[in-house]
Amino acid sequence: FLCQTQSQRDRLKEVANRDGVIVRNPVDLARFRLPLASFEERDRVLWLGRMDRFHKRPLLAIEIARQCPDITFEIIANRGDAAVEAEVRVNCPSNVVLRDYVPRSEIGENYRRSRIFLSTGSAAHEGFPNVFLESAACGTPIVSLEDFDGFLADSECGIEIGRAHV
């Protein structure tokens, strides 16, 4: 059995008494190794994901943006749950730039122009997020509600703040 994280491997052992092999996510890091932007060029907080209530959780990103009205947030959210999308659009504060789509070839530039990458993803519903690897490759620090498989602590490329702070 293939697992993305140690926690998935542990869960497989617990539930099915089976062992698994951890296979990390494939990311072409060369696509994200861009020239570092100056501090002044890094003028936003970036969030990437899709419209859903339990997995990427854009409504939490919207709430965080609301609590930081002097900071620009760029939220790139692919379509998903239409009700969540409608709720995001209605509740989107003025400091949020909401984008439905950015071509994959341009996403590295979005990381590069960001001071922080914000993750509101749920470890209960997601394996290991590629966005952590992409953000780290671009030199963009990560602030996350959860630390997937201890990556942030081990790599020191970001921090886990926990949902209690939202």
Image (cartoon, helix red, strand yellow):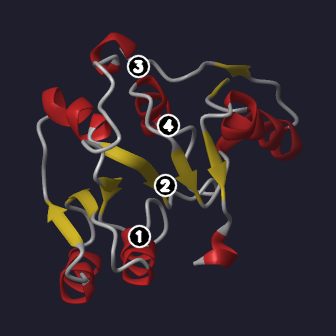
**For residue 89, what is the image quadrant?**
bottom left
- The residue sitting at 24% across, 42% down in the picture is 41
The residue that disc 3 covers is 27
Choose the circle earlier in sequence order: 4 or 2: 2
Q: Position of residue 153 (x, y in %)?
A: 74, 38
Q: Amino acid at mark 1?
A: Ala
- Where is the N terminus found, in terms of image quarters? top right
Q: Disc 1, disc 2: CB below 8 Å?
A: no
Residue nearer the viewer, 23 or 111? 111
Q: Residues within 10 Å of mark 3 (few under 14, many from 20)?
A: few
Q: Position of residue 14 (x, y in %)?
A: 88, 44
The residue that disc 4 covers is 132
Q: Please tell me whether residue 22 is drawn above or below residue 134 in the rendered image.
A: above
Alpha carbons under labels 2 and 3: distance apart: 18 Å
The residue that disc 2 covers is 119
The residue that disc 1 covers is 61
Q: Position of residue 148 (x, y in %)?
A: 65, 44
- The residue sitting at 11% across, 36% down in the picture is 103
